[in-house]
Image (spheres, rainbow, N blue to C red):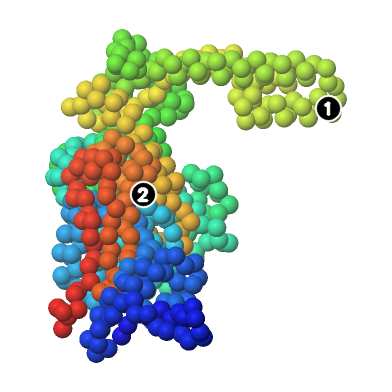
Amino acid sequence: MQLAHNYREPEGCKTRAKVLYSFGRKDRLDLDELRRLIRSISRFLDPEEVAEIQEQIGDDWPFEFLGSRELGGTAFLDGMWARLGIDRVIKALLKKRAFQTPVERLLFAMTANLALAPSSKLHMEHWVAEKAHIEGLPEVQVQQLYRAMDFLLEAHDEIQHDVFFSVANLFNLEVDLLFLDTTSTYFEIEGEDEDVENGGELLDEGLRKRGAESKDRRPDLSQIVVAFAVTRDGIPVRCWTWPGNTVDQNVVEEVKRDLNSWRLGRVVLVEDTGFNSEKNRRILQGAGGHYIIGEKMRLGRTAKPAEALVRGGRYQTLESGLKFKEVVVGGDSEARRRFIVALNPAEAERDRKKRDDIVAEATRRLDALKQLEGEPHEKAACALRSHAVFGRYIHQTKTGKLRLDREKIKAEERLDGKFLISTSDDGLSARDVVLGYKQLAAIERVFRDLKHVVDIRPIRHRLPERIRAHVLLCWLAMLLIRVAENESGRTWFQIKKALDKLQVGIHRTRSGEVWQANNPNDELNELFEILKLKIPPRILSLPIPRGDRV
C-alpha cells in the first residue's frame, strides 16, 4: 500500500505515478496511522465534508463531545444527605423490606429536584436522564418514584424520628425551644375531596378541603394545612399534614403527642396567637412540657391579657432597643398566669403615624357628610360606618349622628408597638421568653421558602397518600437547604449560583464514554470545605480497556 501522486510528463501524453509514502504490506497495515493521516488532512476541509468522509469510511473518531450534566448541586446535596445521616436512616429501614428498586437513591433524587429545579415527577424522568448527574441513578421511571413515595409515607414516623436525632447530635442543636406554626397551600381544582363513610362511620377523611382561613388568601379553593416544628436555628425537624378545613386550635394535641413520643425531655413550644386557647394551653403543659404563646390584646377589659396590659411596671431594654416587662396575673391561685409585655418603640411610631392618617381621613369624610341630605346622606353614612378601615374609629350617637370615637382612639394609642406573650415556664427569664417569641420569624421564613424555593405548589397529586409524601419530600429539601445556609452563612440562591459552575462533560472515545468534570474554582472549594464535604473527582467514569474486557 502506497500513497502515490499521478502526474503527466512535460513531453508526451503519458502519465506516471510518483510514490510519496509507502505504508507496507496490506496484511500488515497500521490502520491507526491511516486514520491519523485522514484526520490531519481533514482539518483543512469544511465540517460538512468531514462528516461526509467520516460516514463514507466508517471511521470511529477517538474523541467527540456529547454533552454535559449538572454536577455541583446534586453532588453538594448528596454530600449533605450522607453527612446528615439520611441515607443511613433510609437504608436501615429498607433492610426490613425486599425492594428491587434503589429507593434511597430515588428519594434523594426527588429531594434534590425540589431543592434545585422543582418539577413534576413525570418530568423527573428527563431531569435524571438528561440534565443532572446523580451518583448511582442513571435513569428513573415515574412508577419507581411513586413506589418510593409510598415507602416514605409508610416509614415517615421512623424516618423523621431518626433524622431528627441524627441532625440534633451532629450539630448539637438546642431543642429545648421548638417553634410551631401552620400554613396552607391550595389546589386549583373544582370542589373538594369527599369523605368516605360506611354506615355512618368515617373511614377516610378527604384531604383537599376548603378552609375558613386561607394563608394564601384563596378561600374559594380547596387546600391542605401544613405544620412545621422548627428549632431556634430555623431547622425544620418535623412536619404534619391535615385536611384544609382544620383550624390551628385543633392541631396542638396531635403535635404534642408526636413530640412526646420522641422523649425529648424539657421542651417549650413557641406558638403564635392562632393556637391560643385554654384547652391548647393545658395540652402544651402535659407531660412536663411548657409553652410560649402570643396573646390577643383586644379581648375586653375583664380578660387577663387586658389586665396585664394596664398593670404598671418598669421596662427593661434589649440591645436591639426592644423593651419588655413582666406581669403576673392571678397571684398564687391555680388561675395564675405569667405575661410579658413587649414594646417596640420604632413600631409604636409607625402605628401612631398610620392611625393619625386614618383618623384625618375619617374626619374629612365626616365633614363631607354635612353637605349631603336625604338618601345620598344615608348611603354615605352607612358606607362610612361599615368601612373596614375608617369605621373602626367612628361611632353612632343615640340621635343617629356619626362622631369620632375618641375612647377607641385612646385605647389604640395604649397598644402602639406592643405585643403580649404568656408562658407557663417559670424557669425562663423574661428576656429569654421575648427573644424566643421573636424567633418565630425563623418558621415564617421556612414557610416562605417552602412556597418560593422548593415550590410546594402546584402539588401535582390527587391521592391523599401522595400529597402527604410530597410534603415530606419538601421537608427533607428544606432540611438540607437550611443546614447549608446556617453552616455557610449564605442564602440558598447564592449557594446554587456557585454550584451551577460545576459541570461534568461527556466525551466519546474509541474505548467508550469518559465523564470528566471541570476544575472547581476557589469559591466552590471553600463552600465544600465549610460544609465538610468532598469535592467530586474529576473523572466520574472511564471505559474499560478492550484488553481487560471479559
Q: Tell me which residue sits at (21%, 23%) in the image.
A: 429
Q: Nearer the viewer, mark 2 or mark 1?
A: 2
| In the image, residue 63 above or below residue 15 | above
Q: Which amino acid, by three-letter code, is at mark 1?
A: Pro
| In the image, residue 461 above or below residue 27 | above
The residue positioned farthest toward the front in the image shown: 11
Q: Which residue is mark 1?
A: 376
Q: Tell me which residue sits at (38%, 17%) in the image.
A: 343
Image quadrant in which the N terminus is located:
bottom left
Answer with left or right where residue 40 lies relative to residue 366. left
Sort mark 1 into few (<14), some (14-19) or many (20+) by Cα contacts within 10 Å: few
Q: Does label 2 or label 1 sit earlier along the sequence? A: 1
| In the image, residue 463 above or below residue 430 | below
Q: Secondary structure at mark 2?
A: loop
Residue 312: percent from left, percent from top: 35, 11
Which of these two is toward me, 52 or 105? 52
Answer with left or right where residue 429 lies relative to residue 297. left
Q: Which amino acid, by three-letter code, is at mark 2?
A: Asp
Residue 20: percent from left, percent from top: 34, 76
Cβ atoms under marks 2 and 1 closer than 8 Å: no
Q: Is residue 469 visible?
A: no
Residue 498: percent from left, percent from top: 34, 44
Which numbered circle lies on residue 106? none
Which of these two is toward me, 549 or 442? 549
Which of these two is toward me, 13 or 90? 13
Which of these two is toward me, 40 or 422? 40
Q: Tell me which residue sits at (37%, 80%) in the image.
A: 18
Q: Secondary structure at mark 1?
A: helix
Q: Tell me which residue sits at (39%, 69%) in the image.
A: 41
Kindly indicate the quadrant of the structure image that contains residue 347. top left
Q: Which residue is mark 2?
A: 500
Answer with left or right where residue 377 lies relative to residue 21. right
